[in-house]
Amino acid sequence: MSTTKDFIVEQLKSEISGFKAEVSEKSVGKVLKVSDGIALVSGLAEAMMSEILIFKTENSEVTGVALNLEDSQVGAIILGDYTAIKEGDEVVATKRILEVPVGENMIGRVVNPLGEPLDGKGKIETSKFYPIEKIAPGVITRASVKEPVQTGIKAIDAMIPIGRGQRELIIGDRQLGKTALAIDTIINQKGQNMKCVYVAIGQKESKVANIVTKLTEAGAMDYTTIVLAGASTSASLLYIAPYAGCAMAEYFLDKGEDVLVIYDDLSKHAVSYREISLLLRRPPGREAYPGDVFYLHSRLLERACKLNKDFGGGSITALPIIETQAGDLSAYIPTNVISITDGQIFLEPDLFYKGNRPAVNAGLSVSRVGSSAQIKAMKKVAGKMRLEAAQYRELAAFAQFGSDLDSETQKKLERGKRLYEIFKQDQYQPLSVAKQVTAYYALINGFMDDVPVDKIREFEAGLYKYADLNDTALKLIDTKKEIDEEVESNLKKLIEDYKITVDYLIK
Amino acid sequence: MKISAQQYAQSLFESVVGKSDKEVKAVLKNFVAVLGQNREFNKEKAIIEAFIDIWNRERGELAATLKSARELGPTARETVVNYLKDKTSAKKIILDEEIDEGLIGGFVLRYGSKVLDGSLKNSLDSLKNKISN
């Protein structure tokens, strides 16, 4: 007991003796008006855009950020308890742009948009700070996207491949599994040399708590940071959350590493920005969003990039999420973000309720990077998959009218049914590329034609188990990353051997 | 378009500068009439403040307040005035002095939107913040 007391006293003594009072001239203003997380401040003639302001209240100091620089006053958003601020309080300009702590120690933590811990695991020791707003890397620093991000989701890795440095939008109505796709992708990054940042914007804290538990169980928190701005946080914190998450990712980018950032979701982000803009009395435009709501998202998503070798070769892959209202893709924010990103994954309620989960619509979902972000083996088996899936949907609708179909069409329909069966995948069960290639290989080469449709999933699960036991084929795919004769013969043998063990084949 | 207090003050200054006392009186009368017409008497306080600012700036004068724990000696006052002249290129400094024992020691100098806080109270406060964090 006494030793701790002595320790504290010693610490205190050294702190006090090391303390040097600094006298420097400061720019000071006065609070004119406070309302709903916004403050108008007089004075502060030299304030910069997005400069940190300190509001000196009676008992504490509250931080704010300058957003509106006007003739005789400054409009600021307040990042803390705005009820503590009173009219006439002093405001000090700090001459620092808003920044967040970054570094290795942020990994595995749940933090708020200011980088302060929310998980009760104590203080985060970091020495580096990054500004939350940064100009995106320019043309000469970039390289083309060609390495894959393996999401571990069969329908996506085959049909809508995502590359490192790409921006792929996940879009759909509520409750269709948008977040589930993102979380599965994070879980599948284990051992793939990827850091992850999950930014929750306006999400229920209970949902985020579930996500943290799931990620911890899956061992994914070893490479993941969660930036949480929950539904109860003020609009100003929601607004800076994605930029803060991006800044944390940029630290790893600058070290030449690959990072995956998930913004969940940007529609709530746009709503919070609308709130701030309206309170700051900026003129409203379409759907009452301010004029610069496009720039709000374009400047954020443009920071996702693949740098070339001379600049470290790192990458930031962005998976923004947008929630639509009743499938309305032509609303303001969805069209904006669709046009900014390099493709979108569209989730459809019809498919979802039919039991096709993940409910990825093969026709409306695209990836503008395309097959250059796939390994050769996947390219080979998945080449025509997208077309086939879309054709099947068309044929199936058509086939409802008549029963007399020629054998060619019959065959296509049967294959299509099995393809859609293969696309089904349970949550939290991401799959390695090698296994995905095995399943697709079996399908397109007709090995599944004599498996009843309702037994496909059983067959598939058995195939993976069997492949794990006799893993020469899987290992070959992993090392060679393409399907040559050796791999092909191994795959054929594996699938044929496995088929002998099942008893439900159509004779 | 609304006219801001700043604009009122600026135009008032421009119309009175270099005029005789009699003329100034007439101008003021007109000015108040205009304010009444525009129903903007509520801006009175802001206009007066802005007018003093403009007046001082245009004539090379600078108003500053100096709070100190104890009364300052002439040399200390001289230093402060020279410091302000150095910083702002003002020719004349109008120093408004106040004694505030709450500062414990040192002084706080304010001019425009700038503050130079060299008080002991401020140092102690920042020490308190540093230790409690």
Image (cartoon, helix red, strand yellow):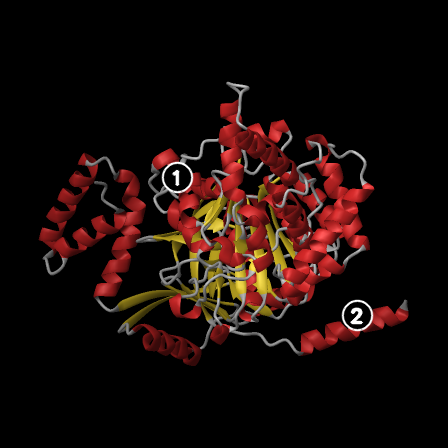
Nearer to me, A98 or A466? A466
User: Which class describes the residues within 10 Å of circle 2: few (<14), some (14-19), or many (20+)?
Assistant: few
Chain letter belonging to callout 2: A
Q: State left or right for residue A346 relative to residue B93.
A: right
The C terminus of chain A: image quadrant: top right
Dividing the picture into quadrants, the one containing residue A483 is: bottom right
Q: Mark 2 vs mark 1: give the one in front.
A: 1
* Residues at discs 2 and 1 in contact (Cβ within 8 Å): no
Q: Where is residue A382 in the image (x, y as percent from the top left)?
A: 56, 49
Where is residue A482, by image quadrant?
bottom right
Chain bearing tag 1 is A
Residue linked to disc 2: A8
Under circle 2, the secondary element is helix
Q: What residue type is labelled 1?
A: Tyr
Circles 2 and 1 on the same chain:
yes
User: Which structural element holds mark 1?
Assistant: loop
Q: Residue at x 59, y 40 (%)?
A: A178
Residue A340 higher or lower than A104, as above or below: above
Residue A460 figure quarter: top right
